[in-house]
Image (cartoon, rainbow, N blue to C red):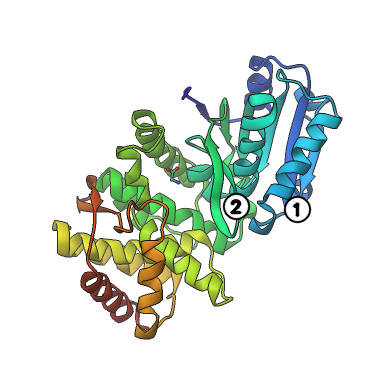
Amino acid sequence: MSKQEIIICKDLDDSLSQAVNRCSHDRLFILTDTHTHNLCMPVLSGISALDSAIEITIGAEDVHKNIETLASVWQTLSEKGATRHSLLINLGGGMVTDLGGFAAATFKRGIPYINIPTTLLSMVDAAVGGKTGINFNGLKNEIGAFAPAVYVLLETEFLRTLDSHNFFSGYAEMLKHGLISDYEHLNELLAFDTEHIDYARLKELVARSVQVKEHIVEQDPHEHGIRKALNLGHTVGHAFESLALMENRPVLHGYAVAWGLVCELYLSHVQTGFPREEMRNVVQFVKENYGTFIFDCKQYDTLYGLMQHDKKNTAGVINFTLLHGVGDICLNQTADRETIFETLDFYRECMGC
Ligand code: GLY
């Protein structure tokens, strides 16, 4: 997989013009959703490198991350004369960068694309690392490809208009990056004043967070080994996310990850010796900022079943990424039913549900 260039923008106009000029192309397309069409396209309006760009706007939110939307993007590319030498810019959150990336990866067997993520979650996770795809058959990201953007342009000014739920959703992935990297980064994340956001400081934290992911992806782009570190918090987190969806009370991905981190740090504590004090610090942060996902012991079997069906598993054995310490990663761990139930007991007790 070719390496993608990640640019922390000082001036989006400048960075985007350079990126577009460096990717030689015959036609230029820009993919937005209804939100980014209204909120973010105006920010790009004076950029002369985009003068000839053809905008394709799709429906917003995960419900549109499907084969019909993908086909509509292929259709417009075709009708508007896109060739193998055309360039696509994805402007949006993870739904736009995932679907747009996959449209680019598959149209005429692949055209180059640039990501401009506009949410914290997409800046620190979805838009970086080359995973693209759509939901299919009720399963998230079931169809997709590893296909990195040529450039990812990070303009943290977009974050000023992000609501607090979407801020914290992205911040959970940053906490995960802190946990799998080093104490210094984890502690600066835990100490960050999330009530009165200093955007210059946030930009530095985002840059560091992306660096953590980039370093891992470079070593293992196709997730055969160390890239699984990025799944910390996600085995239980995905089960919470699916249960919430089944019960018609959907939660944002990052919230499920934050609650999943609480469980998987407890598992790390009992199985791989993660220090109690560090676990407590993270649990406290999650409790204060994410509230609690409420369930009772009658739902343990459902949660266990959901963990068994996670696509990261082989032969029904639940696969966890755990930690021995901050930055000390233990891949391919598992836990039996009893320990998982004990973990859910711990979660309910410490989170007060
Ligand atoms: N979101 C985890 C990864 O990119 O591998």
The structure residue drawn at horizontal position 37% and vertical position 59%, both measured from the top left corner, is 235
Number of numbered labels in the structure image: 2
The spot of residue 297 in percent (x, y) is 34, 84
Residue 215 numbered mark, or none:
none
Q: Is residue 67 left or right of residue 78?
A: left
Which element is circle 2 on? Answer: strand
- Ligand 1 lies in quarter: top left
Q: Circle 1 sits on which residue?
A: 59
* Disc 2 target residue: 135
Mark 2 and mark 1: Cα distance apart in space: 14 Å
Question: Hey, which quadrant is residue 285 in on the image?
Answer: bottom left
Give the side of residue 165 with respect to residue 314, left or right.
right
Horizontal placement of 90 versus 94: left or right? right
**Image coords of residue 24 (percent x, y):** 69, 14
- Residue at 71% over, 20% down: 84
**Residue at screen point 49% across, 42% down:** 203
